[in-house]
Amino acid sequence: MRKQISRNSIYNYIVFVLLLTAVAIAGGAKFEWLKPSEEPVYDLSNIQQPFPKATSFKTNSDNSLSVLDASNHHIGYALISDELDARSQGYVGNIPILIAINNNKKVLGVYLLKNNETADYIEHVVDKHLLESWNGSDVDTTLILTEVDAITGASRSSNAIISNVQKTVSNYLLLEKQQIKISWTFVLQTVMSLLLVLLSLNMVLRRKHKKIYLYYLVAILGIMGLWLKQMLSLEVFHNWLSHGFPWQSNPVLIVILLLSIAMAIAGHKKYYCNFLCPMGALQVLSTKISPFKKRKFPVKIGTLTIRNIYLTYIWVSLLLGFTLPLSNMEPFIAFSFAVASYFMLGAGILIVILSLFFNRPWCQLCPTGCLLDSVPSLFSNAKIKNNEK
């Protein structure tokens, strides 16, 4: 008996293609999938931030930049992290920096160059004056060994900036053998993440440990959500589609994405949503502790679902050229208490409250969940077409 492709499956296919296309185009995608964008990260305008009188610059043999004024007088130096092979990875990718130095080889300031980190995290780092930590320091080994604390709430981004400052100065001084401290915290975070991924696979494929499922969700919420902020989102897809997979920046999250797609194709729908999404874990735990009778969350307005309306709004806006704050289109940044706006914190609290009365209210809207849910529909449709030939 020949199967018919449902209207819902067709719409899922359209949403999947349009949403990915819109997110990619909005980021200026060149679809260079396997390598990050190699566009220049700086120009004269960046150098004019610390040197307002700069009119030109030239590259020296040590890969520093000599900054010149209108009279061609030397007014300082600029060290660009990318030019000195310093590319420490933040949450989404490399965070290039410019270190401005006066003629006496003292640091005038550290400046961020074009990057793809979440704007809220970068703003938090700037507001906490991390970039001013090296002002007035001599450019020598003392600067490299200076202890600078990461910023709470944006530890991955701030650690990348600190590391880039150290590596840039180290390479500038030709101290390639200078030891930069290994981030044992990053090693621990990676190991913990991979252990949770392996445990999730064991629970899905072997259908064991169901008795500890709620404890497992507590670990997902605490480790992947509150500690690591390790979650898939529209903004993450936007950066990856636009600039390629930054394998060095967050390999675990890329593994989670590829694994989620593979599991969906294999028939384990909602694998990511049920086992690895911190927001999903938060909703399930809120539901379990609630004494109220759970209802089905109202998802339709007439014949249209709220999710379809929301997703259509996103991809139409992006395709028409409107700039959307993708990090605020989903409430995931609410896990970063020190960074999130009051609006996003309120959205997170609202989801918890709704979860006391409804089953997974956010999951009925989630664009990320929709994209992952659409994957098995695409492949099932392909099978149907092959069977009809």
Image: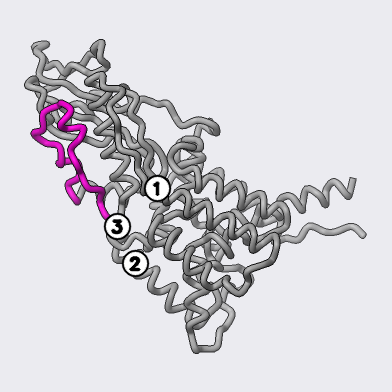
Q: Nearer the viewer, residue 78 or 206?
A: 206
Label 2 CA crowd tier, 10 Å (few <14, some 14–19, many 20+): many
Question: Which numbered disc, 3 or 1, marks the residue that appears first in the sequence?
Answer: 1
Q: Do the residues labelled 3 and 1 touch (CB within 8 Å)?
A: no
Check residue 194 for magenta coloring: no
Question: Which numbered disc, 1 or 2, marks the residue that appears first in the sequence?
Answer: 1
Residue at 57% over, 63% down: 275
Label 3 CA crowd tier, 10 Å (few <14, some 14–19, many 20+): many
Closer mark to the observer between disc 1 and disc 2 = 2
Q: What stretch is highlighted in magenta?
A: 128-152
Q: Which of 11 and 120 is in front in this view?
A: 120
Residue carrying label 3: 339
Check residue 146 for magenta coloring: yes
On residue 345, the disc is 2
Which secondary structure lies at badge 1? loop
Residue carrying label 1: 323
Q: Distance between the residues labelled 2 and 3?
A: 10 Å
Tell me where residue 131 appears, x and y as whole percent.
Answer: 19, 41
On residue 116, the disc is none
Toward the right, the furthest residue is 1
Q: What residue type is labelled 2?
A: Leu
